[in-house]
Amino acid sequence: MAPPQVRVLDIRELSQVARELKRVGADGRSWDILAPKAVFKVVKVSDLPFPAATILKQEMLSVGADVAVARGVVTARARRSDVLIMGTISQLEQLADKISAQPFGLGQLSTEIRRIIAGMVIPQQHRLRCRGLALPLSQRPHIMGVLNLTPDSFSNGGQFNIPQRAIPRAHEMVAQGADIIDVGGESTRPGSQPVSLKEELRRVLPVVEKLCAELKVPVSVDTYKAEVAERALKAGAHIINDISALTFDRRMAEVVAESGAALVLMHIKGTPRNMQRNPRYDDVMAEIFHFLARRVQKAEEAGIARDRLVVDPGIGFGKRVEDNLVILNRLGELHALGLPVLVGVSRKSFIGKVLDLPVDDRLEGSAAAVTLAVAGGAHILRVHDVGAMSRVARMAHAICGTLG
């Protein structure tokens, strides 16, 4: 008698479980019950009071799972603790039921756990509304082509800083596969100096007006100045890409809310001028996640609907090389925000430092980073080399979409 054939399955999503249940021949009526028992998740909750952490520990043990707490909680010496809730989706669902009426803020935690579970069980269908257009971001990764109108950008600086060169370049990128054109009139590379409002408007407006009249794809404007955004939106722009996530200009939220445009909220530590002066993080993904969650809330309070919002972890903006690598490795954590994710890795300095290469020789490094971003679930990829990166993204998506 031959020995049994044994292997471990790499299960990350419920859809994969369903495929395996079908192959085994399990009764289809049992799939909804069995699938959540096959996907294991770790949920981190920060700074819980001692009683709440203790209750969580007890309740998860009661369903056959566990919670990790600070040692001082076990000895009753710690007043507060971060916790790691470890269990299957089914066990997390049971926990949410058990703590829904509990004190010490556990009722609110129950709601948050249910929200996270819903995002895992029901695939989120992101359709980005940007004025009269809608982008089906869940179908495939979308390519945002970079159009720098500046003489001093870290990449392509000065090549397209006049309309006679910028407009043909935009058409070329669309022909190569760009789904969005992102127009920028001020360099935000590390150490860059801000330009005047007048100069940014002079660079941006003629190009935006022309592109909005000629292109069928949305035009995005990369600015943190409310007046530049307002004038660009009047010229027809569809998206505002704000590196400050509404923090540099308080009027930006009002301008975008009234326009119906989409908004990209990016994480940045500091300003472009000083952001690379010794940035430090205890947990880079935790800081990015909670910053973006707060900015999303501010945007919604200003009247910008969730189907008009995109989040960006801000690779290269106040990040060390190792921080950028961690972001790409843990990008999937941002999906708990329930919004599409934009990633900009193209030609950036962390690639140059890892590979010891200048800006113009980072194509392969950019391709590797784009591939990892697609694997992490990025919905929009902001790139310079549109033709090559469009092909990379399509190939990566084809692989990642084949889970069975």
Image (cartoon, rainbow, N blue to C red):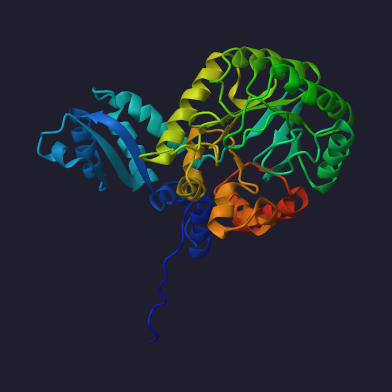
Which residue is at the front of the view, 14 or 354? 354
The image quadrant where one finds the C terminus is bottom right
Residue 265: % across, % down: 57, 28
Quadrant location of residue 164? top right
Image location of residue 196, percent across then percent down: 69, 19
Q: Nearer the viewer, residue 365 or 388?
A: 365
In the figure, is residue 376 to the left or right of 168? left
Residue at left 27%, top 47%?
A: 65
- Residue drawn where x is 51% and y is 32% of the image: 274
Q: Quadrant of residue 244?
A: top right
Residue 169 in the image, given as x and y percentages of width and height: 84, 41
Q: Is residue 97 above or below residue 12?
A: above
Is residue 115 in view from this perspective?
no
Q: Could you say which quadrant of the image residue 69 lies in?
A: top left
Does residue 244 appear to the left or right of 114 in the view shown?
Answer: right
Q: Is residue 333 visible?
A: yes
Horizontal and vertical percent position of residue 217? 80, 34
Identify the image quadrant of the N terminus.
bottom left
For the residue pair 150 and 32, the one nearer the viewer reads as: 150
Tally of numbered discs: 0
Answer above or below: position of 157 versus 3.
Answer: above
Is 222 on the left or on the right of 174, as rendered? Answer: left
